[in-house]
Image (tube, helix red, strand yellow):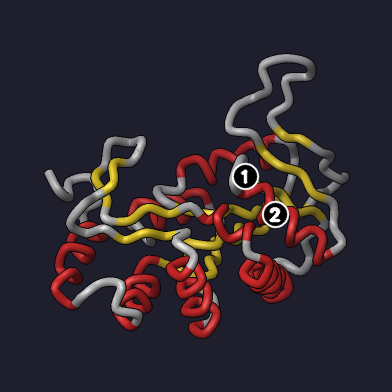
Amino acid sequence: MITIADLGIAEQVASFLLDHEAVKLRPHEPFTWASGWLSPIYCDNRVTLSYPVVRSYIKESLYDLFESHYVTANVIAGVATAGIPMASLVADEALLPLCYVRSAPKGHGMQNLIEGRLPTEAKVMVVEDLISTGGSSLKAVDALRGAGANVLGMAAVFTYGFDVASEAFAASGTDLVALTDYATLVRVALDKKIIQDADLELLTAWRADPAGWGR
């Protein structure tokens, strides 16, 4: 199941992302993702780490998700790479051990896929910065489960809210709670006049068919 945090938190995080250009909206000059998709939106939540007020708010909000959804966790795990600093913020606040999951095993030495130590009978809250299709995030979940961990669920800063992600998380049996999402971001961007009413049709069409949009 995928849920979004409290409306006030969702709108504030969306506002921060837009104000500091961690998210950019260009419905008429689309970006090209690594997948080849054309997209009216580009998201880099790592930008928020450079702003102490924003960083602190995201830390406190992610910690609130820990307390409200995953308080029995005894370890916090980040998803490499952008999820690592977000997970570190939560682990510090919760005074819990931290580990992170690589996208692939290390190519030398111990060839670790999971860096850090999982305690015996690990109960894990996974932290991610961004959810698109969910594939790489759920690969990290699989790695943790393969190492014997009980994954309680995942917290993320932002999700596009794609149907394919909802289906993937449901099939995995993994709960996801995000601080904010695409629908909230578009609404806040409209209020801030970053976009215009005329842009909504393009933005809505992309959300409905991201793979085919702009072709």
Name the side, left or right, on which 118 lies relative to 12: right
Q: Amino acid at mark 2?
A: Ala
Q: Residue at x 63, y 58 (%)?
A: 50
Mark 2, residues whose alpha carbon is within 10 Å: few (<14), some, or many (≥20)? many
Query: Where does label 2 land, which residue?
Result: 87
The residue depicted at 66 percent of the width and 72 percent of the height is 53
Across and down, in percent, residue 150 comes to 72, 50
Q: Position of residue 165 (x, y in %)?
A: 40, 53
Which image quadrant is residue 147 in? Answer: top right
What is the number of the mark on residue 149? none
Disc 1 residue crowd, few under 14, some 14–19, many 20+, Cα 10 Å: many
Q: Earlier in the sequence, mark 2 or mark 1?
A: 1
In the picture, which quadrant includes the C terminus? top left
How far across and down, in percent of the image, does residue 18 sit? 43, 68
SS class of the residue under badge 1?
strand
Helix, strand, or loop for circle 2?
Answer: helix
